[in-house]
Image: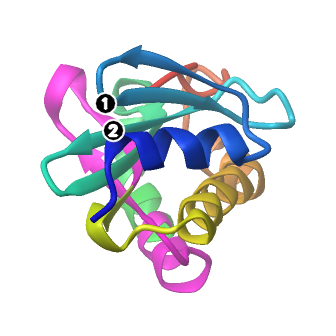
Amino acid sequence: MRTREDVEAYLGKSPYPFRELEENTWLVQDRAGAKENIVVRLSGDLVLFRVNVIDLSSIDTTRREELYALLLELNASDMLHGAYGVSKDGGGKVLLTAAMRLQDLDYSELVGTLDDFTVAIAKHHDGIAQFSTRRSTPPASA
């Protein structure tokens, strides 16, 4: 059975800078220095990965359906380890999330998920940002 120490050791071995935010929660930064940060958190027997991509409040309400269709297409075509979703808490956000079983987690899976997230963030940013009425970058942290 893997433990929080295994997760922290995998993060330490990975090429991604990180810091512990609180017990069982780490903030992982993109190696390219992007503003998006991936939160990795232990919750029971799961390892959760999450990135806040964009605030729904910045999306023109007449274009939300178009944005949601794009996110579903990206989930089906480009995402290996995670998926885009929508959270209604805090005004609503588009999220990139993944969950893995702690007991089976290995280094390659953890790094593969971080790689998948960072590639998705870089590759999909412009397509998602076009829906923003603010034309700004996504929120800085999850």
Q: Secondary structure at mark 2?
A: strand
Q: Is residue 109 above or below residue 50?
A: below
- The answer to whether 109 is drawn above or below residue 73 in the figure is above
* Residue found at x 77% / y 29%: 34
- Residue 41 is tagged as 2
**Which residue range is magenta in the image?**
71-97
Residue found at x 41% / y 40%? 5
Work out whether residue 93 or residue 50 is closer to the camera in this orientation and state it.
50
Q: Which quadrant is the N terminus positioned in?
A: bottom left
Mark 1: which amino acid?
A: Asn
Q: Badge 1, how many Cα within 10 Å: few under 14, some, many 20+? A: some
Residue 8, how many percent across, how many down?
50, 38
Q: What is the basis of the colouring in this image?
A: rainbow
Q: Earlier in the sequence, mark 1 or mark 2?
A: 1
Residue 85, percent across and down? 32, 56
| In this picture, residue 93 sits left or right of residue 118 | left
Asked if the residues shown at circle 1 and circle 2 are in contact, with their CB atoms under 8 angstroms apart, the answer is yes
> Disc 1 designates what residue?
24
Residue, x 42% and y 73% (percent of image)? 72
Q: Left of 4 or right of it: where is 119?
A: right
In the image, 96: left or right of 10? left
| In magenta segment, residue 76 | yes
Residue 140's tag is none
